Amino acid sequence: MARRAFLHVGTAKSGTTFLQDLWWRHRDELRERGLLLPGSVRRDHFAAAAVVKGMTDVVETLGARELEAWSRLVDESRDWPGDVLISNEHFSDSPPEAVAAALADLASAADEVHVMLTARDLGRVLPSAWQQRVKMGARQPYRRFLATVRRGEDGQKFWRYQDVPAILALWSPGLPPERVHLVVVPPSGAPRDELWLRAASVLGLDATGLDTEALRPNDSLGLVEAELLRRVNERLPRHERTPALTRHVKGTFVPEALVGSASREPFVVPERHVAWIRERFEAIVAELAATAYDVVGDLSDLVPADPRAGRTPDEATDDELLDAAQMVLDRLGAGPGESLDEALDAIAGCLQRGTKAQ
């Protein structure tokens, strides 16, 4: 039996990639220090979350071994005498019956079960969340995305990944509140390793001497690059938006062809949205303050800071988009487009061919 099993369930865009990169990079050292990441590769945790949650589109693409990912992680945990960590943000919006089954499985494999949630202020989450959706094939303009989130539309999909009190309530039944950990992402300007250290404190992990420098290239997009990809998505037939195409876009096209095609100009939340965002998260902070969960960090950091000046992707000009598109086409070894429409069609064609070639 494991001593303690930690399940890190999200939230999305709250430093999860940063933490997971470091946990997997230092997997051997963590094992020596008593913390096991079960499975062979990071994708095992994604496959496990897909199976637990019942992500039909993903599950249908999994091989026989990946379909058994969750049970294998639980079995490995049961055979480990120390602490165990499983992490994937897709756990966050699992159905209640799936949550109960997952917690029961972990309870059969460890003396103690702990749930950890990382959370970030909404002013920084919203641009990242829209950008992530665009990488997954979304066509919705940024301004419409913000309006949808504000009205709670889109089947509440955004809030299922970002309603911190609701996610904690979903994953806490049967657990003592001191075993439900909320790690607040530090505000902008904090030391880069502060989130890492906060998570390590929850895990009881001695992180001394473990490098926290990012090794993977930063594939965050500036506003012109993000809007260019959104417009390319509009040229791709919906029936061709396969998991293979999404993997090609995220794993190859974005880092190798799109990143750096325009200046890395960050985009902002327009000032007209700031008041409702702040009001929503002030209410969330008040709700969390009334609970007995273990909070690491300052809950007030979940309230967005004052807005900064800047543009949004909707304000990217056609000339800016065409210049970026021409650079993308050059990197792809394709001829230039005479117009923005031609360039967008050409990039879409390259993506379709690149997916089929894999």
Image: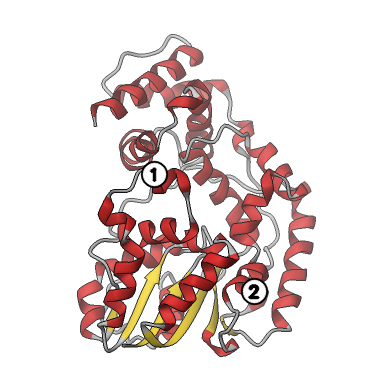
> Which picture quadrant has residue 206?
bottom left
Q: Is residue 188 visible?
A: no
Residue in the foreground of this view, choosing between 74 and 181:
74
* Image height of 322 relative to 220, above or below: above
Whole-percent x, y for residue 354 in the image: 29, 27
The residue that mark 2 highlights is 169
- Mark 2 or mark 1: name the one nearer the start of the chain: 1
SS category of the residue bearing label 1: loop
Measuring from the top left, give residue 336's x and y in whole percent.
Answer: 36, 14
Front residue of 196/306: it is 196
Query: Which label sits in the foreground, 2 or 1?
Result: 1
Identify the mark at residue 296; answer none if there is no mark.
Answer: none
As drawn, 5 above or below 321: below
Distance of label 2 from label 1 (alpha carbons): 29 Å
In-image side of 192 versus 289 (left or right): left
* Quarter placement of the C terminus: top left
Percent across and percent down for residue 271 are: 74, 49
Query: In the image, what residue occupies the spot 47% across and 47% down?
Result: 56
Q: Which residue is mark 1?
A: 60
Where is 208 relative to 141, above or below?
Answer: below
Colour scheme of the rendered structure: secondary structure
How many numbered marks, from 0 up? 2
Relative to residue 20, is residue 311 drawn left or right? right
Task: Report the amino acid beneath label 1.
Answer: Glu
Q: Residue at x 47, y 21 (%)?
A: 322
Q: Within 10 angstroms of label 1, few (less than 14), some, or many (20 or more) residues?
A: few
Q: Position of residue 83 (x, y in %)?
A: 33, 85
In the rendered view, tell whether residue 231 sits above or below residue 289.
Answer: above
Q: Nearer the viewer, residue 202 or 43?
A: 43
